[in-house]
Amino acid sequence: MSTSHEGGTATTHRVLILGAGYAGMAAAIQLAARTKRRADVQVTLVNAQERFTERLRLHMVATGQQLHERDIPALLADAGAQFVRGWVTAVDAHAKTVRIDDSRVLHYDTLVYGLGSVADTTLVPGVEDHAYTLDNAQDAVSLADRLARLAEGTVVVVGSGLTGVESAAEIAERYPRLNVVLAGRQEPGATMNPRARAYVRAALDRLGVQVRSGTAVTKVLPDSVELAGETTIAADVVLWTGGTRVSPLAAAAGLTVDQRGRVVTDATLRSVSHPDVYAIGDAAAIRQGYGVMHGTCQSGMPTGVHAAVSITRVLDGRQPRPFRFGYYHTPVSLGRHDAVVQFTHPDDSPRRVCLTGRAAVWYKETVGASPWPTYLRMVKMPASGAFWPHGGRFTRLRDAR
């Protein structure tokens, strides 16, 4: 235990959580709810915005649809946690400090690193200057404004992964006057079984989306994109969904990171180089029996819950338990009136079972809207965090006790 900042006592254990994405919010709410009656624990969440970003649904915001405002400080106050608004500009793992906006320093005893990821706009020339992204609500609103003012023309969505597919379908349905092109290296729905993959392609065809798969975008210009092989597609708007990158702050702090800059963790989600630091969500390189996990809301929230439970166990003088996680599904919206849900094996490989049509729309919307109600439930019933909702089914998050 050590001296606290901002209202703590000399015996207060300060837990600082960086980032209020799906994983960071789960960690903050779960830990605060579990330690609310303890005077010796202070939980503080740092985030650049007070509004919670539903990244799973930003393709809806990008087409002018309104989502509920989710107030982070109010929910944290109910749970018993503090909120600090600001940009994290440096982490000193040796001094156990975090610098906010280059002007304010917060101290910690335990750090939960959950700064997440953003679209990688650095690898292809012109992306930073000429393409839109869906990293936050402001980005999505900016794209929505541009699309609404576009009387006609072509929108090129780069990246044929799930975000690209959802965005292309949403734009094509919302703005039938626009020509929508989906360009990427892989076929849309490539990770799904043949039936689900064919359903995705048929839905895109029905919506009029032109698919250019098996190709790479090599440059983004003000009015076009260049493909490998010197082919050019005219573009009035370019949306970039082709890959992500994480903050360089972890590497700069001296934490052991992988080749993508993610914090390498042990089985309990602790940094392998700094055991007083936990890493969660997209910011963490977490190895399971099937390999290193990839970042999704589906896996991010359980990592946040597990980190919170582990910290609670350590504070009680017990050892944290290993984190175990298996994927369950891949829900993909295809506009507002269609969707496909690919059920998966724990290693994320596709099962033979999938949902399509109205049932899939209901399932996808239920899952997409579930994080905030899950946080609300955890405030009142902390133990409910050991369960993670998959549509209408709840799966036990093992060892989260």
Image (cartoon, rainbow, N blue to C red):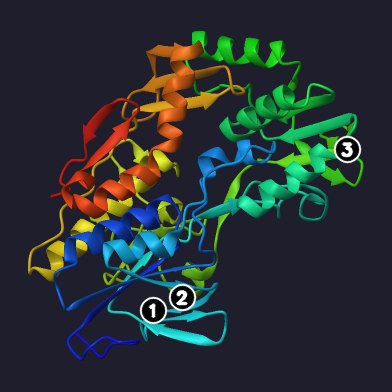
* Residue 249 shows in this picture: yes
Judged left or right of residue 205, residue 45 is: left
Badge 3: residue crowd in 10 Å (few <14, some 14–19, many ≥20): some
- In the picture, the disc for residue 253 is 2
Q: Amino acid at mark 2?
A: Ala
Mark 3 vs mark 2: give the one in front.
3
Q: Residue at x 55, y 38 (%)?
A: 57
Q: Residue at x 41, y 83 (%)?
A: 106
Is tag 3's residue or tag 2's residue first in the polypeptide sequence?
Answer: 3
- In the picture, the disc for residue 236 is 3
Is tag 3's residue or tag 1's residue first in the polypeptide sequence?
Answer: 1
Q: Amino acid at mark 3?
A: Asp
Residue 292: % across, % down: 38, 44
Q: Secondary structure at mark 3?
A: loop
Mark 3 vs mark 1: give the one in front.
3
Position above or below: 188 against 37: above
Residue 179: % across, % down: 83, 24
Q: Which residue is mark 1?
A: 93
Position above or below: 321 against 297: below
Q: CA distance from mark 1 to mark 2?
A: 6 Å
Residue 267: % across, % down: 24, 53
Judged left or right of residue 343, residue 126 is: right
